[in-house]
Amino acid sequence: MIRNQFILTPSFLDQPLSGLEELFQPGWQINQVAPAGTALVRRIAGIQAGLASLVVEAIQAGRRPVSIAGDCCTAIGMLAGLVRTGIDPHLIWFDAHGDFNTWETTPSGFLGGMPLAMLAGLGEQTILELLEIEPLPQERITLTDARDLDPGEKELVASSRITHLNDPLALLETPLPDRPLWIHFDTDVVDPTFVSAQNYPAPGGISPEELGRVFSHLAETGKVAAVSLSSWAPGLPGVEDSRTICLDLLALLC
């Protein structure tokens, strides 16, 4: 069985995220690059470059990289590390939101709502360019459940070539590609009734028991080459239960 290398990035975009560093355990690595530059995308890119280097180290040591961070933009650092070591993955993205906005579709201008679009080659591309990586072919991206989409984002998902599964349980019956799998787990995909410590909760969603079935199924394929997790909000009520449930789910996956 492949050993996991946990990599902790205790930040939200370009800011330290108080409370996440408490997860650190012996044997883990920590990505604490001090952001540099005035532009937000450049500051985020610096953090992602640090993560990419640690992902490369893990893979070269024969370990599976498991990234835990405070936001979904750190998925870009994971992709950079994977492609630099020759891993050409299929991405399965679990999220209550699409993270598929561009500057043209976003109603808020929030960069944290754009990383999957970035990975798919749409909209903002500066971070990928600074890390010197190409986007993933859209056919190699599966998004689920994305129950909370902005109007323009919904149209963009529908017109793209990514696969959108409204129900994560559909993965139990969906043929998986014959290539390494990279699983991205935004913890807000879980029904906030169970995981309440979320900055952007969306009503509904899958239960921990149901998602556990999906994660166990994916793990049993033996194809999971990398995992990235976007965490609960450490400073909000319900954090203890949220942390326990999400880490138990992560353990099923890797």
Image (cartoon, grey):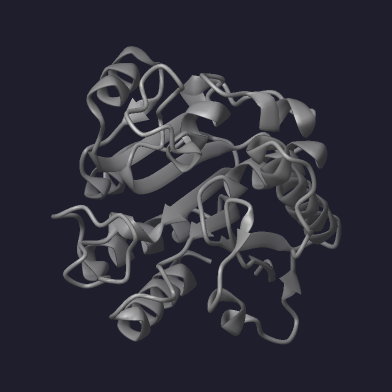
The location of residue 158, given as percent across then percent down, is: 28, 18
Q: Residue at x 40, y 67 (%)?
A: 232
For the N terminus, give its image quadrant. Answer: bottom right
Residue 164 pos. (x, y %) = 30, 31
Locate residue 92: give its quadrant: top left
Residue 138: image x %, image y %? 49, 21
The answer to whether residue 141 is above or below residue 230 is above
Up/down of 172 relative to 254, above or below: above
In the rendered image, is residue 82 in sight?
no
Foreground residue, 214 or 250?
250
When asked about the image quadrant of residue 144, the answer is top left
Residue at 51%, 39% in the rendered image: 91
Relative to 210, residue 238 above or below: below
Q: Can residue 228 be seen?
A: yes
Q: Nearer the viewer, residue 131 or 86?
A: 131
For the residue pair 238 and 15, the one nearer the viewer reads as: 15
- Return the x and y of residue 21 as percentages of the image width and height: 62, 78
Q: Toward which corner of the image does residue 181 lie, by quadrant? A: top right
Would residue 16 be found to the left or right of residue 192 on screen? right
Q: Who's the residue at 52% across and 24% down the image?
A: 120
Kindly give the residue lying farthest to the front in the view shown: 38
User: From this viewpoint, which residue is outermost toward the top?
Assistant: 159
Report the number of discs.
0
